[in-house]
Image (cartoon, rainbow, N blue to C red):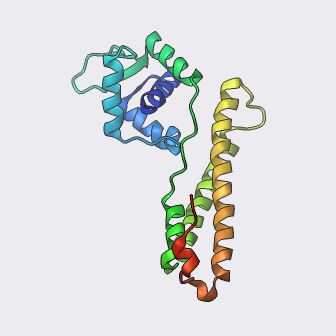
Amino acid sequence: MSLPHAILTALLEKPSSGLELTRRFDKSIGYFWSATHQQIYRELGKLEAEGHIRTLPAEQPARGQKKRYEVLSAGRAELARWTAAAQDPKPQRDVLLLRLRAAAVVGTAGLAADLRRHLELHQRQLTEYEEIERRDFPPDRDAPQDRLRHLVLRAGIDLETFWTQWLTHALKEFAELPGGTREPGPEAARGTSD
């Protein structure tokens, strides 16, 4: 549902070809909404068929030239409608958290190493986001669209900060478990009522 809206957003920011969109997804929107090259091209076809975008006329007719797309008024209206609509938060689904819950009943063998790996990955992502913030959002960049883009980046920074802090705490908890591996007891086997 949201991929077409991500594409409309990217095209309103800058008319692009499918390949350019894929590259832009990899560098910005992809941090919080990923899509493959094939998914983007499939959605471009649907958006064009629905009258939300159109192919820009080629500057010079040439065989094999990349199609560039722009958003039409119907696409802008759809994006505005979607942006204004209320949406409930999605339930959190995280495999690592599920694995920790499972470790309570089967033991933690091998999990501490993966927690350290996750911590390293989140620290690396946090460093990358902070570099983007320093580079792209200096204090004098205060236009409304810049402030909104910065707000999205701050969400990424805050999420990565949360994960690095939580994983650091989790690793301390693991270090306090007897022998570094906790064997499940009867209470773990029962679990908790959800």
Q: From this viewpoint, is residue 147 visible?
A: yes
Q: Is residue 70 above or below residue 134?
A: above
In the foreground, 52 or 20: 52
In the foreground, 193 or 96: 193
Q: Is residue 152 left or right of residue 68?
A: right
Q: Is residue 1 left or right of residue 49?
A: right
For this orientation, the residue located farthest to the right is: 139
Q: Quadrant of residue 71?
A: top left
Q: Which residue is rendered at x = 63% and y = 87% of the image? A: 178
Q: Which residue is rendered at x = 50% and y = 42% of the image? A: 27
Q: Position of residue 117 (x, y in %)?
A: 54, 69
Q: Is residue 103 left or right of residue 164?
A: left
Q: Tell me the quadrant of the picture where the N terminus can be found.
A: top left
Q: Is residue 180 above or below residue 74?
A: below
Q: Which residue is rendered at x = 64% and y = 51% of the image? A: 159
Q: Position of residue 124 (x, y in %)?
A: 59, 59
